[in-house]
Amino acid sequence: MIHYYLDKRKTQEPCEALRGDKDSKYFKFYNLSTLLHPFKFIYDILLEEFAKDLPMLHILMFHYVRNNEDYSYDCYARRFSEFESQINFLSKNLDVASPGDTEKIEYYLLRDDKSACLLTFDDGYKDHALCSKFLQSKSISAIFFPPINAVKGELLDVNAIHYLIGERSISKDELLKYIVLQVKEKNLRIRSFIGLPVTIEEYLRQGAVSRYDDASTTFIKRLLQRDIVDDSIRRDVIHKCLSFFSNLNISEHAKDLYLSAQEMQQMRLEGMYFGSHGLTHRWLSRLDAKEQEAEILKSFEELEKLSLFDKIQDPKVLCYPYGSYNSETITIQENQAVTYSLTTHVGAATGNLSSSSRLELNRWDTNDFWCDQWRRPTMPS
């Protein structure tokens, strides 16, 4: 069984502790840790030695890196001190590959006797400027994926939803009731988790299984991110929720939340790379081929205009917004000569940069490399 631990103040994301089952690579270390709890340094040494023998490429995904008590709302985040600890742990125990070193990346994708890690950051948050400076101090490069509409000052739907869910004065149950009321009053069309037309009553009877979220949070996220049909109608519901439950200044919030072009250009000078997270951060699998092609092609063009991407020297890397893609997305990327692409499928990455497998690389969440029980970095189980 996997146990989750969540700080009551929600200052960091829940994470998977070490497995205690017989099939886990860490079973012997997990049980040894129970005996050696007063002497964790012994366990640390054993785990770090064991980590060096884990094969394959481990691609880590970061979003927010911040301390929630410094903000007016909570979100799942890695505290900055935890981030520093995690990077120190990774650089000590694994080879940290540069996003631009495609030869090294392919080497580790194909190996089963050696391992490395690659660091990725989604959504273009201001937090990432501090991360960049810390990484530069360690001579480490990472790749960052800012959605173009966020760069231009638009608040992403996903971040508006994070605010609604994380604002301490807003009840998630009341928020969900308000969304359901909007659906009923306006007779809005909605789709199930698998894309079928359903009534709101049928929708709420679905099994809301999520790696981190409770049922109410999962329903809120899915309805406002995707399952209310028509992007403009869904976005209107989000704005009505913000108006009803808060007095958030949307443009100021976006300005405070996202990296500016100048900040990203400074990160570029610090040795960081940038890739596409779409033009407007949409679920690609819900778009037709023409719309997908525009989302991908134009996003790289905009990154190039901002001097964040060099089509001659840099790898062309796409990170799927929401982890969403389909066979058409793969075909479009092959035609556009995308170097490699990142999913939200959990696990170590394997593949070949000369085959289509390069366009479906797995990633770990930062939580998979963190044990909340002991507040320390670890290897995933």
Image (cartoon, rainbow, N blue to C red):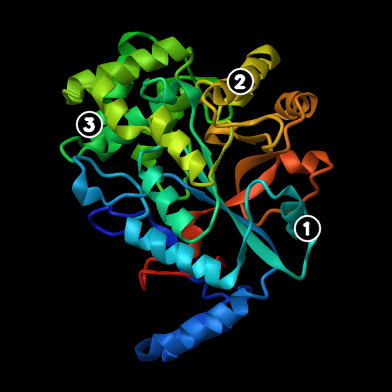
Residue 22, picture quadrant: bottom right
Q: Amino acid at mark 1?
A: Tyr
Q: Residue furthest front?
A: 269
Q: Against 237, is 123 above or below?
A: below
Looking at the image, residue 72 sits to the left or right of residue 30; the answer is: left
Q: Amino acid at mark 2?
A: Glu
Q: Amino acid at mark 3?
A: Glu
Q: Position of residue 10 (x, y in %)?
A: 28, 52
Q: Are marks 2 and 1 in contact (CB under 8 Å)?
A: no
Which badge, 3 or 1, comes first in the chain's sequence? Answer: 1
Q: Are marks 2 and 3 in contact (CB under 8 Å)?
A: no
Disc 3 residue crowd, few under 14, some 14–19, many 20+, Cα 10 Å: few
Q: Residue furthest top?
A: 186
Residue at 68% x, 34% y is 316
Q: Position of residue 368 (x, y in %)?
A: 50, 60
Query: Is residue 274 at least partly visible in the picture?
Result: yes
Alpha-carbon distance for marks 3 and 1?
Answer: 51 Å
The residue beneath circle 3 is 174
The residue beneath circle 1 is 107
Label 3 SS: helix
Alpha-carbon distance for marks 2 and 3?
Answer: 42 Å
Mark number, residue 124: none
Q: Against 205, is 181 above or below?
A: above
Q: 73 or 238: which is nearer to us?
A: 73
Label 1 SS: helix
Q: Position of residue 114 (x, y in %)?
A: 73, 69
Mark number, residue 301: 2
Residue at 57% x, 84% y is 28
Q: Position of residue 123 (x, y in %)?
A: 45, 35
